[in-house]
Amino acid sequence: MKKVFVDVAIERCTACKSCEIACAVEHSSSRNLFAAIFETPAPKKRIHVEKALSFSYPAKCMHCVDAPCIMACPTGAMCRDPEVGSVMVNEDRCMGCWMCAMGCPFGAISTDSEKGIAVKCDFCKSRLKEGKDPACVEVCPTHALSCGEPEELSKEKRLHTAQRVAVAVCMEKEERSKTTPLDILREFWGLKKLRYS
């Protein structure tokens, strides 16, 4: 299985929270929205949409290479999945000390108070095995979340940036075309435009 990464385009997030709902449903017993609502205990989401100034940010585990949560976990419950490369929680080993949550710089680890264990993004590993994207990525209506290999996502970002730069250059050229050579000289020499009355 290829190494995957979920990227966030913060400028596209509208805080609709579809990702939160899809995540909770994906991790429910029934995997059905209407049935999941009535499950006890309620299914836990692993992504949290937070407000930041005028933006919204879907905060989730970044599956760090040097994961502080793995280093902080005294029982080894936080471990790396060898297939996907994601940081996982071994529920059988977790003792609910929350050292992982304190060590996480992204605040991506929450608690399941009923089970007394840590809860975090697992990349929807079962969906990845089926060739699908994680549930949060699949339902995002604005494509603020995208999934792929790191190099593939970097290439997409470079192309997107190149397109934005090209549009900006075209707009600037269009603005300049409204300026006459005489106006440029006046601006260069600090002269004011003469007005005739």
Image (cartoon, helix red, strand yellow):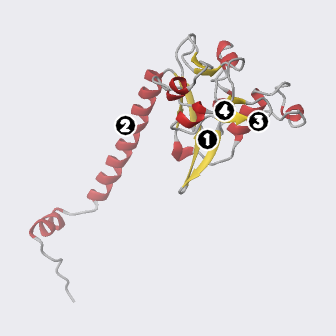
Q: Nearer the viewer, residue 47 or 129?
A: 47
Query: What amino acid is found at the position of numbered circle 4 in the picture?
Result: Cys
Q: Nearer the viewer, residue 179 or 103?
A: 103
Q: Nearer the viewer, residue 101 or 158?
A: 101
Q: Position of residue 121 (x, y in %)?
A: 64, 28
Q: Earlier in the sequence, mark 4 or mark 1?
A: 4
CA gap, disc 3 to disc 1?
Answer: 32 Å
Q: Which residue is mark 1?
A: 142
Q: Which residue is mark 2?
A: 162
Assess disc 1: are there few (<14), some (14-19) or many (≥20) residues with their C-alpha within 10 Å of its C-alpha: few
Query: What amino acid is found at the position of numbered circle 1 in the picture?
Result: Thr
Q: Earlier in the sequence, mark 3 or mark 1?
A: 3
Give the left or right position of residue 112, taking residue 120 as reference.
Answer: right
Residue depth check, mark 3 versus mark 2: number of the one nearer the observer: 3
Q: Which residue is mark 3?
A: 113
Query: What amino acid is found at the position of numbered circle 2 in the picture?
Result: Ala
CA gap, disc 4 to disc 3?
Answer: 23 Å
Q: Which residue is mark 4?
A: 136
Q: Earlier in the sequence, mark 1 or mark 2?
A: 1
Q: SS for tag 1? A: loop
Residue that extends furthest to the bottom in the rendered view of this protein: 197
Q: Quadrant for residue 179, please give it.
A: bottom left
Figure quadrant of the C terminus? bottom left
* Residue located at (57% from left, 10% from top): 83
